[in-house]
Image: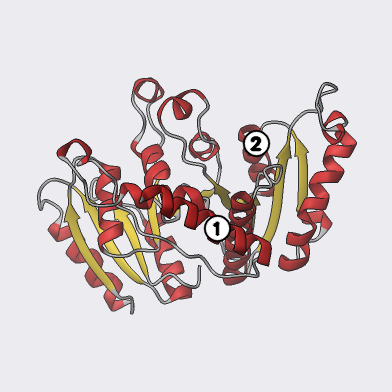
Amino acid sequence: MHTIRNTLVVVDAQQPGEMILHRAKMIASATRSHLHLLACNKGNHHSPYLHDLQTSLQQQGYSVSTQQAWHGSEHRTIITVQQAKECGLVIKQHFTDNPVKKAFLTPEDWKLLRYCPSPVLMVKTERPWTDGTILAAVDIGNSDVEHRVLHSGIVSHGYDIAKLAGGTLHMMSAHPYPMLSASDPIFQLKESIQAFYRDQCKRFQAEFHISDERLHIVEGPPEVLIPYHVHKLEAALTVVGSVARTGLNGALIGNTAEMLLDTLDSDILVLKPNDVILHLEELAAPPASPSVDTAIISWPYSHHSHRVEPEVSHQISRLSAQRAKVRR
């Protein structure tokens, strides 16, 4: 979070609100980042609105620029500008989609979460972050190298934001129901599953000063339990990861971050694992033919650095080298 130098703020003249500007100003004040305000439209209809916003924010001491753009769709426009302006964070207000429309068309905010390689902050409530609860939700059961790096990023961002806002960091992970037929004996009993998950969380507890009372290991589906704990803890912000599934997998399985958008009673910050970022970087390469001219433009993001295990660092380098060979 401390490394952000440019923040992209998506504004809407037709649905102006103070929530998104309040979040943007708070982050800009804490990180000393530049704010780039973007209105997604095909013409220059919002020039007076953007000018007034820019003037007001500059009078308050913020570094601000504005832009109106359109690149075929809202999510593509946001990602294109995020790439061009090298923004390390995208802030957007989320409005609940019509259920009937969502059944037939993938919502633009879902596409933004899938394809944007930088973190995306979806603003949903007016609940203040200051002195509030920040919830970092991780899938600790996925312990491969890239998920471990993602988990560190999720908890690290939660820790940074809690520290900046004077809030309290909580951490949670939902585990599956026990199955007597599971090949691993650990997953045959609820007690052994919970013990395994708590053991996996010890490093995070030690590094980010999370007490046992603020660690929540629960049984059941994350898309149900995360909203429950957000409501129970009155969390102001939830930090989660997204594997950014696309195609048939995305349609049938879904992404937890997407399913949480309409159910969470808090703002939500979405991060991605390293392999997904690399894949989106490949999509961002100049198109080789007109058939791929819809490639999404991306920009690599590096969050506030905490300790990374040598084994993790070595394996990430090895994975990156393997991908480079494949691309050649």
Q: Nearer the viewer, residue 194 or 235?
A: 194
On residue 222, the disc is: 2
Residue 313 appears anywhere in the view: yes
Which marked residue is nearer to the observer: mark 1 or mark 2? 1
**Residue 152 percent coordinates (x, y):** 63, 59
Q: Nearer the viewer, residue 182 or 76?
A: 182
User: Which residue is identified by label 1?
Assistant: 318
**Residue 318 percent coordinates (x, y):** 55, 58
What is the image's colouring? Answer: secondary structure
The mark that comes first in sequence, 1 or 2, is 2
Give the left or right position of residue 121, taking residue 76 as reference.
Answer: right
**Residue 20 percent coordinates (x, y):** 39, 56
Quarter-wise, where is residue 47 in the image? bottom left
Residue 179 higher or lower than 76, as above or below: above
- The amino acid type, in three-letter code, at marker 2 is Pro
Residue at point 76% right, 54% down? 201
Residue 139 higher or lower than 26, as above or below: above
Mark 1 vs mark 2, CA separation in Å: 31 Å
